[in-house]
């Protein structure tokens, strides 16, 4: 697992998630088909792209840049 993602607990019976709030911007990815929830850190400058395949989250790409 990447250091940019953190797996969160997902109660499949009640369909609830407990999300810790930090100081950095992030997004929460929920894939009920796989029964997974992940907290993904966003890049400082650039794009964080979520890719799917066959209706499931398959990949997270980070496209970083630097301000000049």
Image (cartoon, grey):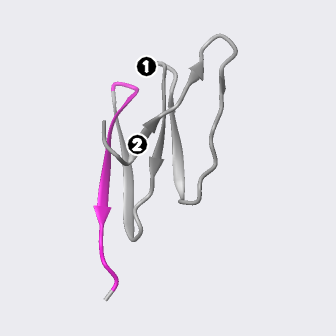
Q: CA distance from mark 2 to mark 1?
A: 16 Å
**Residue 7 magenta-highlighted:** no
Residue occupied by mark 1: 34
Q: Main secondary structure of the magenta part?
A: strand
Q: From the viewer's side, name the closer residue of 11 and 31.
A: 11
Residue sitting at 30 percent across and 73 percent down?
Answer: 65
- Mark 2 and mark 1 lie on one chain; the one further toward the N terminus is 2
Q: Write down the region rendered in magenta.
A: 54-67
Whole-percent x, y for residue 5 in the image? 40, 42
Q: Position of residue 17 (x, y in %)?
A: 64, 29
Q: Residue at x 40, y 26 (%)?
A: 55
Q: Please tell me which residue is depicted at 65% across the width and 10% down the height of the picture.
A: 13
Is the Cβ of the residue at disc 2 closer than 8 Å to that at disc 1? no
Q: Which mark is residue 5?
A: 2
Tag 1 secondary structure: loop
Q: Which mark is residue 19?
A: none
Q: Quadrant of the C terminus?
A: bottom left
């Amino acid at each position: 697992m990447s250091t940019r993602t953190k797996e969160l607990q997902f109660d499949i019976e009640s369909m609830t998630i407990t999300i810790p709030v930090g100081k950095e911007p992030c997004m929460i990815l929920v894939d009920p088909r796989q029964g997974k929830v992940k907290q993904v850190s966003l890049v400082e400058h650039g794009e964080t792209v979520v890719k799917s395949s066959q209706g499931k989250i398959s990949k997270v790409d980070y496209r970083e840049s630097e301000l000049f």
